[in-house]
Image (tube, rainbow, N blue to C red):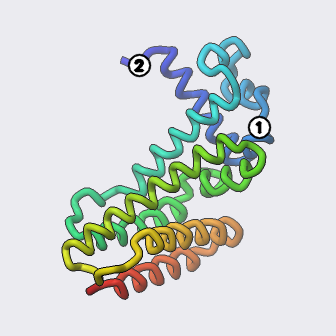
Amino acid sequence: METKGARTHQLIIEKSLQLFSLKGYHSTSINNILEATRLTKGGLYGHFQSKEAVWYAVYDEAVRRWHRVVFAGVSGIADPLRRIEKVVENDLMNYLGGDIFEGGCFFLNALVELSGQSPEMSRHMLRGFIRFSKLLQQWLVEAESGGLIRAGLQHREIANFIFISLNGAAALYAVTRDQSVLEQTKSQLHHYLRQLQA
């Protein structure tokens, strides 16, 4: 059974996620969080030592939500290229197109805001991006070893291209809210992956 303390901890994360998504980290004050949660300063600081500590917990929650959406249905796919296609489709159509976070892509927004302002927080996010790119690389290596793609391809560059394409679509979709941006990116990336086949 969930304790009152655990519920309060989660409430702080939920309300702060909404605030950081809509207003940004720097434009969200401790008072904004207190108003949203209806907590006292003592109640908030009993769970988190600082606004930065709240952000790290919010980031972890955002990653969990992204992971749940983007990797839905992926574990049962044996073909690594189809896995990549499914992740691309889920990211574009269900994560970005599904408006999981009120302010758009939480990660893109945070990275743009924090770059040059909060180096450690930016590095923390970049480590997450690198982990995702490395997973794509692993799947490409698996595809090559299974004879599914041509030998000798630059897995890192391919994975980074896919990652950059997804983030480019996220930025353009945030500005336009045009669903065709997502559809075209999905189609182009699927076409690109087919060109890698042996």
What residue is pinned by disc 2? 2
Say which of marks 1 and 2 sits in front. Answer: 1
**Residue nearer the viewer, 37 or 16:** 16
Where residue 71 sits in the image (x, y, percent)? 36, 56
Q: Are marks 1 and 2 in contact (CB under 8 Å)?
A: no
Q: Is residue 80 left or right of residue 14?
A: left
Using the rendered view, name the quadrant where residue 137 is placed.
bottom left
Residue 28 tag number:
1
Few, some or many residues within 10 Å of mark 2 (<14, 14–19, 20+)? few
* Quadrant including the N terminus: top left
Q: Label 1's element?
A: loop
Residue shown at the point (51%, 39%) measured from the top left: 61
Q: Give the residue type that dot 2 points to.
A: Glu
Residue 20, horizontal then vertical, whole percent? 68, 42
In this view, 45 is above or below 174: above
Q: 14 or 149, which is in the foreground? A: 149
**Left or right: 43, with 183 as reference point:** right
Q: Amino acid at mark 1?
A: Thr
Residue 76, how many percent across, how many down?
A: 22, 59
The residue depicted at 47 percent of the width and 63 percent of the height is 91
